[in-house]
Amino acid sequence: MTLPTTHVSFPAGAVTGESTVLAVHPLDDGRHAVVTGATPFHPLDHTWPDQPADLGTLTVDGVELAVVDCLTGAVGPDGGAPLVGADIPVRRGDEEWSWLVLHVLAADPGDLVGRTALLTVDAGRRAALSASHSGCHLLALALNEALAPRWRKDPGRADAFGHPDFDSLAMAASVMDTEASTDTYRLGKSLRKKGFTADATEDLPALADALPELTEAVNRRLAAWVAADAPVRVDVPGPELTARRQWHCELPEGAARIFCGGTHLHHLGELAELRTELRLSEDGGELVAVTRPKRA
Ligand SMILES: [Zn+2]
């Protein structure tokens, strides 16, 4: 029997749930993965592992089991044990495959199949990760705006506010933790070819010289958005883990949308402050933004 793709409630912000255990699989490292029909747990994504896994507990028949990791598993059309991480040979959402949230336990929990599990996410950790993830998307929009004058031609991809989408065009890596979001951008030849310049021009100083001013502009924008207490939600086209969800934020300048598989705040007033720090590598080839939310 092939397991159905897991239904998830984390996009709406859920941190608890109840569901039937469908399978328990041993993993290569001696740990065990519990699969349920539905879950509030957010797993690490195998294609774009930006937001770390939720941790928490599974409680079955009054016995509390620690969930020490949460991964995305995939089962192919021929069935078998779920593959994990780099072992998955297809991209997220491949319709021929089942996509599973794997609740990882340190040891074999015994036969739980068919029993009801109470699923409880570590809500403090989740809230911190959600704040970092919302901060990541806001930084993207504020940075796109601040860098807009540096495009000498239209790169053909704009963000929700019509600014050239530097964030997605230059993105090399995006990683969140409970403290911050760290976004690394590559300022290479291909970005230059698309029209971006980090050099001094008639109207602009070189990016390296403009960095303090740029940082200030981005932080002013972020502060205004936090002060506006803009509502945030995740639009969900279906309950499956693989549904193509969208982050939606009702900012004063208009509605912003970004495709996103993670978790988020409900409104920006949950933050007391959101600030970024921009750093340019010695050789100018890499721009790093570390964006820290301070929760209210
Ligand atoms: Zn996201």
Image (cartoon, grey):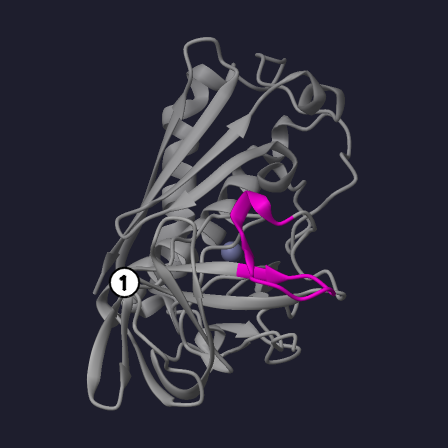
Front position in the image: 226 or 27: 27
Front position in the image: 293 or 114: 114
Q: Is residue 250 visible?
A: no
Tell me the amino acid under the disc marked 1. Ala
Q: Quadrant of residue 281?
A: top left
| Label 1 crowd (10 A; few <14 / some 14-19 / many >=20) | few
Q: Residue lying at the far front in this picture: please name it.
A: 110
Q: Is residue 136 visible?
A: yes
100 left or right of 118?
A: right
* Mark 1 within 8 Å of ligand 1, using the beta carbon: no
Whole-percent x, y for residue 60 in the image: 28, 86
Whole-percent x, y for residue 272 in the image: 24, 60
Is 79 part of what is drawn in magenta? yes
Front position in the image: 196 or 168: 168
| Residue pointed to by mark 1 | 107
Q: Residue at x 76, y 65 (%)?
A: 96
Q: Which residues are magenta?
A: 73-88
Whole-percent x, y for residue 242 in the image: 63, 67
State which quarter of the image contains the N terminus: bottom right
In this rendering, is residue 168 above or below 287? below
Q: Residue at x 56, y 25 (%)?
A: 186
